Image (cartoon, helix red, strand yellow):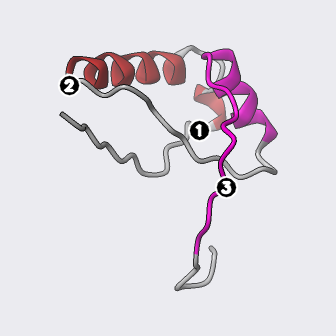
Amino acid sequence: MTAIAARSITWLAPGRQRLAIGRSLMERVEQRLLAMGCPKINVLVRTTNVQVIAFYEKLGYARDDAFSLGKRLIPDL
């Protein structure tokens, strides 16, 4: 069985960061996807967002040897 999940842009207000809320949310997401048989999670983070990259690396995520392509249809807000 192939499980596919998509997640929209998620962020925490500055006053809510560093309270383990993001870590807790990701742990719950990982547990639910694992229960559904999902073998891997991929996240997309802008290369300039070093704080979020560091967050995911602390959770055990590693950079893949892959290239992401996108096409903007509306201006980036």
Q: For the magenta stretch, what is the residue range?
A: 50-70
Q: Quadrant of residue 16?
A: top right
**Disc 2 packing (10 Å; few <14; some 14–19; many ≥20):** few
Q: Is the residue 15 above or below the residue 4 in the image?
A: above
- Where disc 1 sits, the SS reads loop
Q: Report the quarter where the N terminus lies.
A: top left
CA distance for labels 3 and 2: 27 Å
Crowdedness near tag 3: few (<14), some (14–19) or many (≥20) residues, C-alpha within 10 Å: few
Number of numbered discs overlaid on the protein picture? 3
Q: Are marks 2 and 1 in contact (CB under 8 Å)?
A: no
Assess whether residue 67 is covered by the magenta stretch: yes
Q: CA–CA distance between discs 2 and 1?
A: 30 Å
Mark 3: secondary structure:
loop
Q: Earlier in the sequence, mark 3 or mark 2?
A: 2
- Residue at image position (26%, 21%) is 32
Horizontal side, residue 30 vs residue 65: left or right: left
**What residue did someone put label 2 on?**
36
Q: Amino acid at mark 1?
A: Ala
Q: Is residue 43 magenta?
A: no
Q: Amino acid at mark 2?
A: Met
